Image: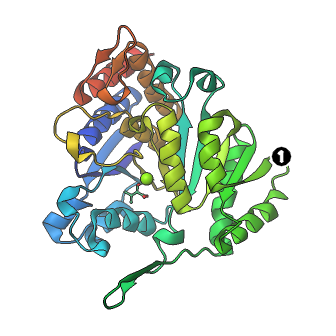
Amino acid sequence: MNKNIAVIRGDGIGPEIVNEAIKVLDVIAEKYGHTFSYTDADMGGCAIDKYGDPLPQHELDKCLKTDSVLLGAVGGPKWDGVPGNMRPEKGLLRIRAGMGVYSNNRPAKIWPQLASASPLKPEIVEKGIDFIIVRELIGGIYFGEHKTYGQGEKVSEDVMKYSESEIERIGRIGFETARKRRKKLCSVEKSNVLDTSRLWKSVMHRLAAEYPDVELSDMLVDNCAMQIVKDPSQFDVIVTENMFGDILSDEASMITGSIGMIPSSSLGATSNGLYEPIHGSAPDIAGKDVANPIGTILSAAMMLRFSFDMPAEADDIEAAVGKVLSEGYRTGDIMSSEDGLKLTKCSEMGDLICRAIKASK
Ligand code: IPM
Ligand code: MG
């Protein structure tokens, strides 16, 4: 198959981790007889420096013409002073909205090799951690009106707004995702306080009638934050709005050992998706070749699985990651005091994963 992939390296560690993912994609292309071509696009701080805009329309248009987008990370202290609507993160929000990718899928799964890197007690980890957060990505408070006004004392407002149809389309993704797994869907909201959450809950219950094989439960977001550390084994699929999903997915990643391991897919009505690790640009370690590229490499695997219909290729990448971890290779973020572990650079990690793919049948 021929696929054209837009590549946004972004800022901080973005370029390093994306380069490792491209190495892996090239090895896959060679092994399976595909042709992957890459279209570079600028977004985030580097686009502000180059064009004075975190995502100029021409860069978004480039991405829309490709088969999917692979993204590293954006942002950094250099652009802290720029106005809110011109921040690097605004580029990220604009590409998500511009591509219409309303459904963000963030798996929280513990790799058995990394169990000792989890901050949870071993008896909790042993019960298993394997759930997915389905986060609504292009609505809610992130995209409501933002304003700051007032003379003397300033006042700020950010509007959280959801329509029934926005809730319904993400709700369906939640039910469909659960249907392919252990058939348990937990809808997370704050319906004891927020109108948007009461609407959310009512739409989820209306949809439940169409998915009788899926067991739907409701949970308040504050309780969910607690349950994720108390007993994560209770969760299969969590569906939630944009900001709650942002916060809960960082928490969920941490209990699996490191945020550096977690990939994500974002999809809308077409197969053209946006794939990015869930961590940030980590400016403090940028350019040092010490970042963990696995979240980005696994995001590339998700691209093959969900946008390109290449499940064997995606399995191959995931198995190679498992093999390299089993051999004891660790970047700094997943290093522990266990015997026999080898501290590994970002580029070495990419090379080892490529080698494991080439070596497997
Ligand atoms: C994420 C990030 C982004 C978000 C930031 C960088 C805008 O935290 O992808 O989780 O809040 O969505
Ligand atoms: Mg986040």
Q: Which residue is mark 1?
A: 213
Nearer-the-camera pick, 280 or 297:
280
Q: Residues within 10 Å of mark 1 (few under 14, many from 20)?
A: few
- Residue 111 horizontal/vertical position (percent): 51, 25
Nearer-the-camera pick, 220 or 246:
220
Viewed as shown, does residue 110 lie left or right of 285?
A: right
Residue extending farthest left: 50
Residue at 46% across, 69% down: 142
The reply to whether residue 46 is visible in this rendering is no
Residue at 65% across, 71% down: 194
- Residue 46 horizontal/vertical position (percent): 19, 59
Q: Secondary structure at mark 1?
A: loop
On the rendering, which quadrant does ligand 1 occupy? bottom left
Indicate the quadrant where residue 182 lies: top right
Q: Vertical placement of 10 versus 351: above or below?
A: below
The reply to whether residue 348 is visible in this rendering is yes
